[in-house]
Structure formats: C-alpha cells, structure tokens
Image (tube, grey):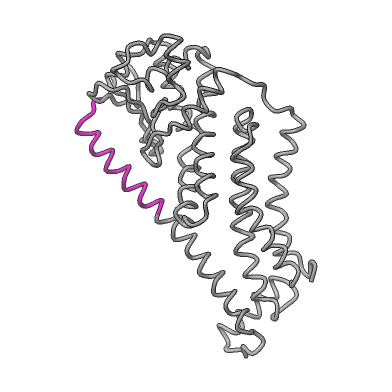
Amino acid sequence: MFWASYLLAVLAVILAWPVPVLLSRAQWPARSPFTAMILWQAVGLAGGLSMIGAMLVYGLEPLGDNLVAGLRGLAAMVLFNAPTTALGFWHLFALSAAALLTAHLVFTLLLTYVRIRRQRRRHRELLELLASPSPERAGTLVISHDSPVAYCLPGGARSITVLSDGLVSALEPAELRAVLSHENAHLSQRHHLLLWAFAAWRQALPWLPTTLLAQQAVNSLIEMLADDVALKEVSRTTLITAIAIVSAGPENPDARRPQALQAGMGASPAGLDQDSATGSFSARTTASRVSRLLEPRPPLPQSLTAAVLALSALLLAVPTALLIVPGLLG
C-alpha cells in the first residue's frame, strides 16, 4: 500500500491542477459538449477519490497490505480496543484528514442541495404571487416585465419554465420556440444536478482555483447541450437571433440586425437563459455559445470521442484499483 498511496497523491495533484487548466483552455469541448461533460465529471470524481484515497491508504498501511485488511484493523482498534501502537503520528494524521475531508465534502454537498432547494421554494412562492400561467403553454408561467427573461425552475413533476411578457412580445414565434426548446432541454436532461454537484465542489474547495474553472466550464457546456436540442427544432440563424435579442435587452431595437449581432454579442452580459443554480448571467458563456453557432465546427470523430470516453473510464478505474485490489504495488 506504500506505493499506492503515493501514486494516488500524484494523481490527485494532476487532476486538481494541470488537467482542469488544460481542459478549460481546450477548444474541442465546444465540438462535442456531451463528451466533454463526461470527462469533466470523471476528473472531478477521480480527483476527489484520489485525494481521499491517498491519505486513507497511507494511514492504513501499517494495518494491512490492502484497503480491506487495513479497514478491518482500524475497526478492531475502534470497536474492540485493539492496540494502536502500529499507527504512528503521521498515519493517525492522514486518517483524520481523510475522515475530515470526506465529511466536509459530503456535508457541503448536502448543504448546497438544501440551500438550492430553499431558494427554489422561495422563488416558486414569489412566482405564485407575481406570475400567471401561460394559456398557450403547459408548465409555463409569464411574469409582467419589460426585459426579455427566460429561465427554468427544476422541481421534478412541478418543473416550470418562466417567461416575461417582454420576451414574448420581442420574439417571433420561431425564436420563442427556440427559447422554450432550450429551457425544456435543461429540464429533461437534468442539468440542474450537474450544476449542483460542481457548485458543491466549488463551495467545498474554494481555495482550489480549478474548481472555479470546472464550474464555469460545466455551465458553458450545459448551455451548448441545450442549444443543440434547440437546433433540432429551429434554424441556426433563428437561435442566434433569439440569443441576440435577449442579450441586447429591451432598449436595443436593432438586435435583429446582423451588424448588432456581430458587434455586440461578444460583450453581452446576458445569455438566452438564466443559470438555474446560481441565478447569474455569464457573458463568457454567451460569447462562447454565439461563437460556436456563428462558426460551426464538425463534432469530434468517433475515434477521438471513444478515446475521451475511454480516458474518462480509466480515470475512475485507476484510483479505484489502487484502493481495492489486494496487495497492488504493495
């Protein structure tokens, strides 16, 4: 287990710093956002598993040649008062750190979930007072507001899409269909669960800059995934126009013009919809989405897609094997 702990520590460092930085700077995720999303999830899960596993394996090393034997020895110490002389100071420190980090991550995940649920419940209560059901669209509420607003509020069977009457009046039927398709994609593909997981990762490890990179990347990827669904119902031009109108706001009547689209979208502070987890707009996400739509590139070849998916599986398999395979590298 000695070498396994060090290999896990090296893997944790690699997945915590250089890999997220390189992945956040890569251009290919815009071509295959689903594949990139799988890889980001694998990086996050494998990084956390390696970080905790490195400390756990190192702490249990004196108690056995594999994780199972080490845990049995630790259980005997805790439950049956077996001698603890085999564990030195640094082994006890590593075990304590592993336990604290695990508890911290789980607690933060649950706390983030409770906070998001509370925010959504309050938001839903306000909508019951300020919004009215759309007579034409099931599961849609309309608020009286001049600014173009569109977002989804997840809630299982009670999930809703919220539109402003300013948005409805500003968009043509096809453009409004693009917005609704985009929002419905967020709900049907459960994007709020991804946002929740990466928001919790960010909250748990705010001192790690790459958690912010991961959260930003995931936010951008889910918007691209929703755009791809919308493109199945409307043309690319229609979708870009809808984004341009929402981004330009009610005070820019020239949003439909090509020159306004080309010159103004890159710095626009708003996107097609509002991020359902944080309630904030992302200019960077909007710029990347529009750039992707204006200059479409083909998806990754099947061979590269398979390679990325295989790498994702390998990232999860390696730390798992180092943890559970008896005597591996021991």
Residue 93, percent across and down?
57, 77
Q: Inspect the magenta stretch and tell me whether residue 119 lies in it.
A: yes
Residue 172, percent across and down?
38, 10
Residue, far left = 129
> Looking at the picture, does residue 265 appear above or below residue 329?
above
Residue 16, percent across and down?
60, 54
Residue 188, percent across and down?
48, 32
Q: Inspect the magenta stretch and tell me whether residue 293 lies in it.
A: no
Which residues are drawn in magenta?
112-132
Secondary structure mostly seen in magenta is helix
- From the image, which quarter does the C terminus lie in? bottom right
Disc tally is 0
Q: Residue at x 38, y 13 (%)?
A: 255
Res 30 → quadrant:
top right
> Looking at the picture, does residue 204 appear above or below residue 184?
below
Q: Residue at x 32, y 42 (%)?
A: 120
Res 129 → quadrant:
top left
Residue 4 vs residue 209, the one in the foreground: 209
Residue, far front = 263
- From the image, which quarter does the N terminus lie in? bottom right
Left or right: where does residue 92 sit relative to residue 174? right
Q: Residue at x 53, y 44 (%)?
A: 213
> Looking at the picture, does residue 122 appear above or below residue 46?
above
> Looking at the picture, does residue 138 appear above or below residue 206?
above
Q: Residue at x 70, y 47 (%)?
A: 313
Left or right: where does residue 234 sit relative to residue 117? right
